[in-house]
Image: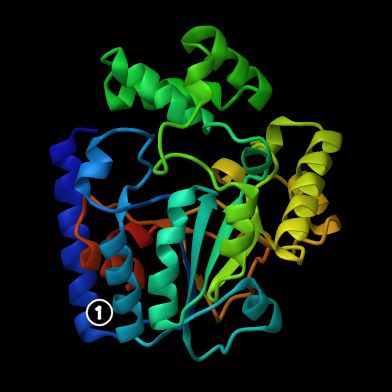
């Protein structure tokens, strides 16, 4: 779809959402936002050291928090969801995926506003430090002059392969240095850093598998191993076993859900973009999440996701 058409649709969606919120009160619900990295400024984004995902700036993250606090949202954790949420209130859970060291930039903001966030960690990148393969791939292809959409298409093809095969292809195609982080911006936490990070007020850790394995592609034995190893590593680092899992790439299946629950995980976060109304039973192992994009107007996106009748929600 052409960019001009996407932009036009977004503007129409934002106008519709704001008009709805002007005249109608939203229904009580749980919304979950997903982030990956926090960038200091636009120059850090423009350096193209990594695959950008949504490209949220630190100050945009602050703006998101203040927006939802002003709208009387309660910020919650997996433990709050397990206990049961007040059906008359609005709830929001902030989540991060992967385990980038740059996530530590969230701590001062979380503590300033006294809100929590859940950081889902691919623990193999912490215990055996290396670049997340999609970042190494992005840097290599950009150096060859590839456009973003072409890189994205190839990454989607690579995601269908076992993670070990992908990393082998990276080394064969681009050399060992392609799997080495380039800076504090694109590298994962070290174990020592993650231990300190986990001790900070407002920080909760969650499971994101050992190797960012897209779980439906694997046997039950490998799924179990990926989840067990991540749980064990996180327990040794932070002193507790997490109860939430963010399925890598948002992909899951009934088998994945069943194994996750057997490993003590009772909250499962997907790639489905939706909110959950308190009037309906909460599917705890397949909770939807919404990304925000730093290149778009942040308050407008927040309005859109908060509104019960914004155009993009009409299909739900």
Q: Nearer the viewer, residue 7 or 81?
A: 81
Q: Nearer the viewer, residue 101 or 34?
A: 101
**Crowd band around label 1 with a 10 angstrom C-alpha radius: few (<14), some (14–19), many (20+):** some
Q: Nearer the viewer, residue 302 or 222?
A: 222
Which residue does the image show at 33% across and 57% down from the upper left?
Answer: 312
- The quarter of the displayed image where residue 129 is located: top right
Position of residue 125 in the picture relative to residue 34 (left or right): right
Where does residue 266 sit, x and y in percent of width and height? 74, 65
* Quadrant holding the C terminus: bottom left
Q: Nearer the viewer, residue 46 or 296?
A: 46
Where does residue 249 sit, x and y in percent of width and height? 55, 41
- Position of 212 relative to 306 (above/below): above
Which residue is farthest top? Answer: 172
Q: Is residue 35 visible?
A: no
Position of residue 295 in the picture relative to residue 192 (left or right): left
- Position of 117 relative to 293 (above/below): below
Which residue does the image show at 16% across and 41% down from the upper left?
Answer: 5
* Quadrant holding the N terminus: top left
- Position of 44 relative to 162 (above/below): below
- The quarter of the displayed image where residue 218 is located: top right
SS for dot 1 = helix
Q: Is residue 24 visible?
A: yes
Residue beneath label 1, please?
21
Which residue does the image show at 57% across and 89% down from the upper left?
Answer: 86
Position of residue 194 in the picture relative to residue 299 (left or right): right
Coloration mode: rainbow
Which residue does the image show at 56% across and 46% down from the upper left?
Answer: 250
Where does residue 213 sit, x and y in percent of width and height? 66, 36
Where does residue 60 sit, x and y in percent of width and height? 27, 63
């Amino acid at each position: 779809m052409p960019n001009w058409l996407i932009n036009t649709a977004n503007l129409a969606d934002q106008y519709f959402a704001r008009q709805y919120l002007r005249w109608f009160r939203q229904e009580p619900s749980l919304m979950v936002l997903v982030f990956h990295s926090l960038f200091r400024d636009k120059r850090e984004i423009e350096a193209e050291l990594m695959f950008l995902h949504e490209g949220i700036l630190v100050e945009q993250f602050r703006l998101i928090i203040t927006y939802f606090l002003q709208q009387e949202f309660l910020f919650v954790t997996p433990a709050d969801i397990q206990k049961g949420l007040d059906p008359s209130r609005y709830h929001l859970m902030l989540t991060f995926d992967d385990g980038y060291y740059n996530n530590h930039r969230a701590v001062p903001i979380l503590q300033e506003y006294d809100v929590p966030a859940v950081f889902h960690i691919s623990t193999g990148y912490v215990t055996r430090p290396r670049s997340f393969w999609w970042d190494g791939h992005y840097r290599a292809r950009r150096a060859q002059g590839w456009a973003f959409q072409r890189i994205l298409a190839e990454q989607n093809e690579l995601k269908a392969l076992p993670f070990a095969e992908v990393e082998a292809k990276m080394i064969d195609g681009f050399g060992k240095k392609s799997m080495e982080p380039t800076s504090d911006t694109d590298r994962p936490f070290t174990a020592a850093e993650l231990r300190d990070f986990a001790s900070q007020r407002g920080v909760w850790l969650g499971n994101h598998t050992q190797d960012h394995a897209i779980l439906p592609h694997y046997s039950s034995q490998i799924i179990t191993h990926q989840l067990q190893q991540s749980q064990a590593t996180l327990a040794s680092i932070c002193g507790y076993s997490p109860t939430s899992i963010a399925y890598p790439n948002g992909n899951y299946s009934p088998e994945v859900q069943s194994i996750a629950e057997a490993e003590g995980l009772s909250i499962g976060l997907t790639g489905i973009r939706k909110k959950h109304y308190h009037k309906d039973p909460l599917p705890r192992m397949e909770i939807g999440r919404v990304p925000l994009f730093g290149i778009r107007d942040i308050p407008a996106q927040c309005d859109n996701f908060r509104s019960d009748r914004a155009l993009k929600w009409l299909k739900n």
